[in-house]
Image (cartoon, rainbow, N blue to C red):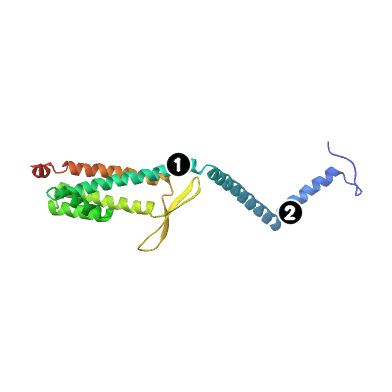
Amino acid sequence: MPDNKRTSDGKTEAEISKEGLEKAKRWFETDDGKEFLRLHERVTVARDRERAFIEDFAKYMLHPEANASRLYLSIGKFIVRFSQLEAWIRLSCLGFFFETDPDAVLILVESYDFRALVGLTRTLYERKFSKTSDIVRAASSVFKQCLDINDQRVRLVHSTWILSSPDSFGALHTGRQNFRSDVFFKQIEEIERVIEKIEKVETELRKILSGEYDKEIWDELDG
C-alpha cells in the first residue's frame, strides 16, 4: 500500500512519486527529452549489434574449420572439376594430331594455359570442319562457356580470401585491366553454381568428342 506518511512540505511519498513521474513525462516530451530517447535507442541498437557480432566472431574463432568446411569443400571441388574440364579440352585438341608424334604434341599442348588452349582447340575445329556445321557451332558455344568459367577460376584462385565471420566471407579480386577491386563469391551457392556449369559444359564437350553432334563427319574420320 502507498505510504501516507507526510513529508516536511505536507505531501505523502506517493504524491511526490506521482509528481516526479509526471514531471519526467513532461521532460521527455521536450526537445531535450526526445533527443535523449533517440540517443538511448541508438546506443541500445549499437550495443545489441556489437553483442551479436562478438558472439558470432567468438563462434568462428572457436570453431573456424567447422564453420568454413563447406566453403573449403566447394573451393576444392571447383578446382578438381575445372582440372577435369581442362583435361577433356586437351584430349579434344590432341584428337587433331593422331598421325603426329603423340609425345611431342602432348609437350606442345601442355605448354598452353587454359585460355590459349581453348583458343587453339576452337581454331582447329573451325579449320577442320565447316563453320556452319553442327559440331563447330556446338564447339564454339562450349568454348565460349569455358572462357567464362576460366574468368571465375581466376577470381577464385587469384584473390585474397576474407573470412570475417561464419557467414561473412568473399574473394577480394583486383582486375588486371581496370585495376578495380571487388568481392566475389560472397555466398557458397555462387561457387556451387559455377561447379554445376563446369559439369554441364564437360558433358557437352564429351558429346562433341563422341561425334553426337555430327556423326557422319566423325564416321569419315574413323574410316
Left or right: 22, with 190 as reference point: right
Name the secondary structure under disc 1.
Answer: helix
Q: Nearer the viewer, mark 1 or mark 2?
A: 1
- Crowding near pointer 2: few (<14 within 10 Å), some, many (20+)? few
Residue situated furthest bottom in the rendering:
178
Disc 1 crowd, CA 10 A, few/some/many (<14, 14-19, 20+): few
Q: Residue, x 24% and y 52% (percent of image)?
A: 110
Of the residues shown, which amino acid type is indicated by label 1? Ser
Is 150 placed above or below 59 here?
A: below
| Of the pair 185 and 134, the residue shown nearer to us | 185
View extreme (top): residue? 1
Q: Where 74 sits versus 183, above or below?
A: above
Indicate the quadrant containing the N terminus: top left, top right, bottom left or bottom right. Answer: top right
Q: Which mark is residue 155?
A: none
List the residue tagged with mark 2: 27
Q: CA distance from mark 1 to mark 2?
A: 55 Å
Counting residues from the start of the chain, the first of labels 1 and 2 encountered is 2
Report which residue position mark 1 lands on: 69
Q: Viewed as shown, does residue 79 lie left or right of 50?
A: left
Place of residue 52 in the rendered image (x, y in percent of width and height, measured from the top left): 58, 46
For this view, does 102 lie left or right of residue 83? left
Q: Quadrant of residue 76?
A: top left
Residue at image position (29%, 44%) is 84
* Position of residue 81 measured from the top left corner of the image (x, y, whole percent): 32, 44
For the point 23% across and 43% down, the residue is: 204
Kindly state the secondary structure of the residue where label 2 is placed: helix
